[in-house]
Amino acid sequence: MAWQVKTADFVTSATGPEGFPEGDRPEIAFGGRSNVGKSSLINTLVGRKKLVKTSKRPGRTQLINFFNINDKLYAVDLPGYGFAKVPKEVKDAWGPMIEGYLSNRPSLRALVVVMDLRRGVQEDDWELIMAAPHFGIQPVMVFTKADKFKKNAREQRRRELAKDIEANPGDLILFSSTTGLGRDELWKRLLYLAGL
Ligand SMILES: Nc1nc2c(ncn2[C@@H]2O[C@H](COP(=O)(O)OP(=O)(O)OP(=O)(O)O)[C@@H](O)[C@H]2O)c(=O)[nH]1
Ligand SMILES: [Mg+2]
């Protein structure tokens, strides 16, 4: 079941711990490559078209953005990685910024790694998935833009990707911000991890 989202509001943007809001509620972060659809996914989850700014141009989100949902949960939109055309200083800042976040957030319950179902798990995605447990954080693998596939092809792709990374097909969540596919399944997983 999806959560009944009554309120969803932008709280603050930050680049480091001094700018983070008090960690007084469970928190879920969303990471992934630039342009993969992280911001769209958050909008779809909360059912607000424009809560988070989305863009056709990669590298739109360059700060750590906090959103308050129902006063019970923080959703955090992380800046994307892996986009070649981002200026070097932005690229170099990414690692320390993400590490500063992951290692300073005891209230963080899950890291959703958002990937494109067509592209699958890229090397930098895998690094993030593997890093999460070192920070005591559960990674959740979500493959978005699943609307680009027909149902059979989609399920075939799920099995293929699961095999590649030696995971159970059921551990991979297929998602679409266009059709809402996977929304309820992802909510269920996130609320469980958040203890809500
Ligand atoms: N077809 C389809 N397009 C999508 C989906 N999700 C996002 N998009 C499109 O992909 C582009 C990027 O979406 P964003 O949500 O801004 O991506 P992002 O990962 O937040 O990007 P950065 O902030 O630049 O890292 C936009 O043009 C979206 O409309 C989806 O599920 N299906
Ligand atoms: Mg974004």
Image: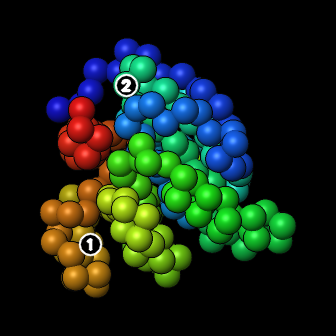
Q: Please, which colouring scheme is shown?
A: rainbow
In-image side of 88 versus 34 (left or right): right
> Which image quadrant is residue 154 in?
bottom left
> Which image quadrant is residue 13 in?
top right
Would you name the residue on which mark 2 appears?
72
Give the residue displayed 36% in from the left and 68% down from the top.
133
Q: Quadrant of the N terminus?
A: top left
Q: Secondary structure at mark 1?
A: helix
Would you name the residue on which mark 1 appears?
157
Q: Secondary structure at mark 2?
A: loop
Please tell me which of labels 2 and 1 falls first in the chain: 2
Q: Position of residue 165 (x, y in %)?
A: 29, 81
Residue 155 visible at all: no
In-image side of 153 versus 73 (left or right): left
Q: Position of residue 152 (x, y in %)?
A: 18, 64
Mark 2 vs mark 1, foreground winner is 2
Give the residue displayed 55% in from the left and 45% down from the top.
77
Q: Position of residue 118 (x, y in %)?
A: 41, 69
Q: Is residue 101 above or below residue 14?
A: below
